[in-house]
Image: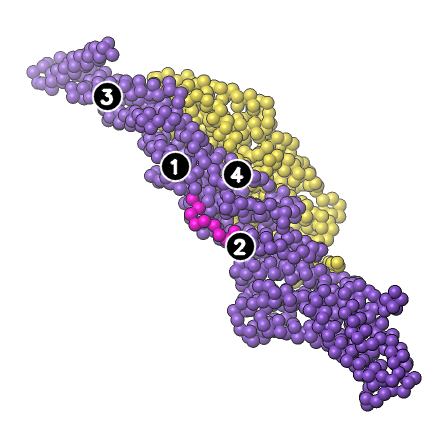
Chain colours: A purple, B yellow
């Protein structure tokens, strides 16, 4: 230290002498008592001395040597910093702020030196400036390493607990063959509702909050030293890696568009669910948090914050966008409808959040394209609905459905629209502008709307749901014509229309169909029931009906008894094989048969009570036999009697 | 936008003519005319591209001369995409506007159109891969910009030289890794390693520069599925591409073939120029029959690009994009300068460096100007192609509705 000091003093001494010489020379040149040739010599000397640039004004010279002194000190400090393997943050707060002070010192040195070198192109000040620049480069490189280190060591991920992704095992399957008629699982319904409640404050800390001020100081240092580009490169790289890692921890696979278009329904269903799930996490939580981080660290540096944000997140958002595009490009199979609606709903909800992210600001196309994607998903959803109706219409058969029971198509369609009604708000938006010309029942619908008048029956969804059921009804009418037996035809229609009505009444579908619709359909079932009893029993009844109330002659009575028993057995054999699954409808039918047939039979047997041995069945027997009807297992009275 | 304007006018003209065709039932002359016009337009447009690309990227990259639209430059690629969009619009008009849907579903079109749609889906994935590739190129541009600003300081000192070298080493390592992913040549690997080593030893205090740079580009997420290969995709697109022969060559089969060729060629050129996931085997390009008149300019371009690719494979340089080749050449030269730099540098050397820095700055400027629009244009191609596919599918769907009577 002593040696250094004396060396400095020697240096200083030299400078003083040089300064004095220059001063003297200038004075001589300026004077007018020198001959011209002498003046020439001194002028040259002046230029020469000046170009040595060791000396400025005496004051400047002092300042200069002081600068050199400071630079040396800074060099020592940076040297010590470099030899320390530990990162500043890990060595404690004091260490870090010492480093920042050194950088500030270098910056201020460079500023002073630049002011001096503006006068002198070459020489000592320039050399010092170069040394300072080199020192700054060393410090900046180290600071960049520090930045990367801190970004990696202190990054944090969050577990998306409150939006955990359920496996799709317990899913209702809607398939094109209409084979699956499972009722909707209660979980499915509750799952939809549960996704609606997310915490208000979505922001999380992607970097431990205690290091954020340190990172901000690094940014400040690097930007002040004109190393902003280096900062952004390193920052974006580290943040991008963090997002990639997070993406991997979420278990996300990446698919090409070709992959998505070729994907089987099971995988596609899964991936579509994942998309809706991950969109929420990324757009609601991750990216706003990333944006906050960028703003916290880079907020003071203008457009750098949005630019770094976009560079970090663009690839991920573009992937999500392209997956959506691929889905919207796919076919319009009915099975996709709910997943499409999910995707549409999620995106519609998230668009505002996407808009608050600074994509547009950084000139990135992502934001606009998500808006366009919403339209495409909407188109695809509508097309899928149209396809659904087309599938109902074209689902025809050449053989009657055995037993006249509820057709799987009816169950499928009703369960389907029951779930569809859950998406009422979205569907109202999607269906609002749709052409309504294609529906043949629109006149009836208009009438219905006016009569009922409530807003839910007039909504586009209500219109659409009713038009789906009317498509279904006309399909059922066509199917009923396949039965040769007029009674069975009516059982089929009764069963199916009754099922439709019950589904409407017992679910949230009611308001969409309205009381008038329900009344009208119940009445239709009742008419069918009446018609059914008439068709099935008219010939049997004609045997036992009496016009005048008198007893019949024995031979005729005997013949009528035989014929009636035969007719009853015939009906019994047929109609025990038919199935009316709805117990209420079954009982209604049995009661109405009992009222007409058993009642008449009691009269018939009562009038001819003197000849009871021809009576094969008592009225009570018949009453009991009626209970066997519509159970779907063919029985025969002859057989049962033999037993 | 030039492309959009053209498209509008094509659509208008074609649709008016097509209506006439329909009204004058069975006017085959008119139809033949349309086909000929389409062929001629395709030939003309690609001729323009061929003539504007008189200098090869290597030649032009080797000279400081900046002819802005030389082969495989950003400006040239934008012209290529314009050309594609025009051909696409005209083809769509020819195929579906005012046409009886059943015509599109008759043999051999019932096979050729779905094959085209399949190609088109593959093209979409290529578009996506290339879109990501443009971001990789932008990353290189940013590194080059650091070097430009560092070496632009006067006088050049040790600090700025080291700063520039660090950025350029990252740039070269990034390109070499990109190249390794791209052509998987052993040379590429070796090169990446040697550059990296040179970088790290010279970077001194900055330590493991090579590892950093390597990780930097590894972390570039391509946004594509694992194992997805741009080269294989292009090969699959051209796999069943056969010129219609005999009876098949009349009618719409020929324009479908032309459009398929255009799609495959454009995607092939994009993959050759812009870094993207897995390009091994791209050199084996598809064959277009040489006797077809309209195909001559495409074949000409194909030959030129294939030649460039061969040179590239030998040298192990990164990508055919003219601007990237420039960055690479200038980057290497400036790193050499930086390695031997002792203050004060000779005036002559400084002059040379100044010229190189100016060229690097000019290249960066062109990238800054061109890359964002290029990326947007690739997106435009993506969306146009999606829309056309949808419209064609709708036409096929109409035909299907009429003809099919499904039963349970």
**Picture disc at residue A193:** 2
Where disc 4 sits, the SS reads: helix
Q: Residue at x 55, y 69 (%)?
A: A457
Most distant residue in the right direction? A555
Tag 1 or tag 2, which sits nearer the N-term? 2
Q: CA distance from mark 2 to mark 4?
A: 26 Å
Relative placement, left or right, of B224 versus A26 is right
Magenta range: A193-203
Q: CA distance from mark 4 to mark 3?
A: 51 Å
In front: label 1 or label 4: 1
Q: CA distance from mark 2 to mark 3?
A: 70 Å
Pinpoint residue A175: horizontal percent, then vertical percent. 68, 53
Q: Residue at x 50, y 46 (%)?
A: A162
Pinpoint residue A134: horizontal percent, then vertical percent. 34, 21
The quarter of the picture where the C terminus of chain A appears is bottom right
Tag 3 or tag 2, which sits nearer the N-term? 3
| Helix, strand or loop for the magenta stretch, by majority | loop
Residue topped by disc 3: A67
Q: Residue at x 65, y 32 (%)?
A: B284
Q: Is residue A40 above or below residue A579?
A: above
Q: Write down the quadrant of residue B368 in the picture.
A: top left
Residues at circles 2 and 1 in contact by the CB criterion of under 8 Å? no
Relative placement, left or right, of A210 versus B290 is left
Q: Nearer the viewer, residue A321 or B402?
A: A321
Q: CA distance from mark 1 to mark 4?
A: 22 Å
Residues at circles 3 and 1 in contact by the CB criterion of under 8 Å? no
């Amino acid at each position: 230290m002593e040696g250094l000091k004396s060396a400095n003093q020697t240096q200083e001494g030299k400078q003083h002498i040089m300064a004095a010489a220059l001063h003297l020379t200038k004075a001589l040149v300026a004077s007018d008592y020198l001959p011209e040739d002498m003046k020439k010599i001194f002028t040259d000397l002046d230029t020469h001395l000046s170009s040595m640039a060791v000396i400025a004004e005496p004051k400047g010279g002092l300042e200069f040597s002081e600068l050199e002194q400071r630079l040396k000190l800074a060099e020592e400090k940076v040297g010590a910093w470099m030899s320390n393997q530990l990162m500043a943050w890990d060595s404690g707060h004091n260490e870090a702020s010492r480093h920042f002070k050194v950088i500030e010192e270098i910056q201020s040195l460079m500023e002073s030196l630049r002011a001096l070198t503006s006068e002198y192109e070459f020489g000592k000040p320039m050399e010092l400036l170069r040394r300072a620049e080199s020192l700054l480069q060393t410090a900046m490189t180290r600071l960049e390493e520090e930045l990367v280190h801190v970004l990696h060591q202190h990054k944090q991920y969050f577990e998306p607990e409150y939006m955990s992704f359920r496996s799709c095992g317990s899913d209702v399957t809607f398939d094109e063959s209409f084979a699956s008629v499972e009722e909707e699982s209660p979980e499915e319904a509750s799952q939809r509702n549960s996704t609606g409640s997310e915490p208000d404050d979505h922001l999380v800390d992607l970097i431990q909050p205690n290091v954020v001020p340190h990172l901000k100081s690094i940014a400040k240092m690097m930007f002040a030293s004109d190393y902003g580009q280096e900062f952004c490169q390193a920052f974006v790289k580290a943040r991008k890696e963090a997002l990639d890692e997070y993406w991997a921890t979420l278990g996300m696979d990446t698919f090409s568009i070709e992959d998505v278009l070729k994907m089987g329904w099971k995988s596609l269903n899964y991936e579509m669910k994942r998309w809706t799930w991950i969109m929420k996490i990324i757009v609601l939580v991750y990216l706003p948090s990333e944006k906050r981080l960028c703003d916290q660290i880079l907020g003071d540096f203008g457009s750098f914050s949005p630019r770094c944000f976009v560079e970090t997140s663009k690839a991920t958002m573009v992937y999500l966008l392209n997956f959506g595009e691929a889905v919207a490009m796919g076919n319009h199979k009915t099975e996709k409808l709910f997943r499409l609606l999910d995707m549409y709903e999620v995106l519609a909800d998230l668009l505002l959040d996407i808009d608050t992210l600074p994509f547009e600001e950084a000139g990135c196309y992502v934001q606009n394209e998500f808006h366009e994607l919403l339209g495409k998903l909407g188109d695809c959803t509508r097309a899928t609905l149209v396809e659904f109706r087309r599938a109902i219409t074209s689902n025809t058969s050449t053989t009657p459905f055995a037993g006249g029971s509820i057709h799987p198509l009816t169950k499928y369609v009703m369960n389907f629209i029951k779930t569809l009604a859950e998406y009422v708000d979205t569907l109202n938006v999607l269906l609002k502008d749709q052409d309504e010309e294609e529906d043949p029942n629109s006149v009836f619908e208009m009438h219905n709307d006016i009569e009922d008048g409530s807003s839910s029956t007039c909504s586009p969804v209500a219109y659409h749901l009713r038009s789906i059921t009317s498509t279904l009804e006309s399909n059922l009418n066509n199917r009923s014509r396949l039965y040769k037996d007029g009674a069975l035809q009516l059982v089929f229609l009764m069963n199916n229309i009754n099922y439709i009505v019950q589904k409407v009444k017992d679910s949230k579908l009611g308001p969409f169909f309205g009381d008038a619709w329900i009344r009208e359909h119940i009445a239709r079932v009742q008419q069918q029931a009446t018609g059914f009893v008439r068709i099935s029993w008219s010939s049997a009844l004609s045997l036992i009906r009496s016009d005048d109330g008198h007893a019949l002659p024995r031979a005729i009575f005997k013949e009528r008894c035989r014929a009636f028993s035969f007719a009853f057995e015939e009906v019994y054999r047929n109609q025990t094989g038919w199935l009316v699954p709805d117990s209420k409808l079954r009982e209604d039918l049995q009661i109405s048969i009992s009222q007409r047939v058993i009642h008449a039979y009691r009269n018939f047997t009562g009038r001819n009570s003197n000849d009871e041995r021809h009576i094969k069945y008592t009225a009570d027997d018949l009453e009991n036999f009626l209970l066997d009807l519509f159970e779907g297992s063919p029985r025969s009275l002859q057989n049962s009697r033999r037993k | 936008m030039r492309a959009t304007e053209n498209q509008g006018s094509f659509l208008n003209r074609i649709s008016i003519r097509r209506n006439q065709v329909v009204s004058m039932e069975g006017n085959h002359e008119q139809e033949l005319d349309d086909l000929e016009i389409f062929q001629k337009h395709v030939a003309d447009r690609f001729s323009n591209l061929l003539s504007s690309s008189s200098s090869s990227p290597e030649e032009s990259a080797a000279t400081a001369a900046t002819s802005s639209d030389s082969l495989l430059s950003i400006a040239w690629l934008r012209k290529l995409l314009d050309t594609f969009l025009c051909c696409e619009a005209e083809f769509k008009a020819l195929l579906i506007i005012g046409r009886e849907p059943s015509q599109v579903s008759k043999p051999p079109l019932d096979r050729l159109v779905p094959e085209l749609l399949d190609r088109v889906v593959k093209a979409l994935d290529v578009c996506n891969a290339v879109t990501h590739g443009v971001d990789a190129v932008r990353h290189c541009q940013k590194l080059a910009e650091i070097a430009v600003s560092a070496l632009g300081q006067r006088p050049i000192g040790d600090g700025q030289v080291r700063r520039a070298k660090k950025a350029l080493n990252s740039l070269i390592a990034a390109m070499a890794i990109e190249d390794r992913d791209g052509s998987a040549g052993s040379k590429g690997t070796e090169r990446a390693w040697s550059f990296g080593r040179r970088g790290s030893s010279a970077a001194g205090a900055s330590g493991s520069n090579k590892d950093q740079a390597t990780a930097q580009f590894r972390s570039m997420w391509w946004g594509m599925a694992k194992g997805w290969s741009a080269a294989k995709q292009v090969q699959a697109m051209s796999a069943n591409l056969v010129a219609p022969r005999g009876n098949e060559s009349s009618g719409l089969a020929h324009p479908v073939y032309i459009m398929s060729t255009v799609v495959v060629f454009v995607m092939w050129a994009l993959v050759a120029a812009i870094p993207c996931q897995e390009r091994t085997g791209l050199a084996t390009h598809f064959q277009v029959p040489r006797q077809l008149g309209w195909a001559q300019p495409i074949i000409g371009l194909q030959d030129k690009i294939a030649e460039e690719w061969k040179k590239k494979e030998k040298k192990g340089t990164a990508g055919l994009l003219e601007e990237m080749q420039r960055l690479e050449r200038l980057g290497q030269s400036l790193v050499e300068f930086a390695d031997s730099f002792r203050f004060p540098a000779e005036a002559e050397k400084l002059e040379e460096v100044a010229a190189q820095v100016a060229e690097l700055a000019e290249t960066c400027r062109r990238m800054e100007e061109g890359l964002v629009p290029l990326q947007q244009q690739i997106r435009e191609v993506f969306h146009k192609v999606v829309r056309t596919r949808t419209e064609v599918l709708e036409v096929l769907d109409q035909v299907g509705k009429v003809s099919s009577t499904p039963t349970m």
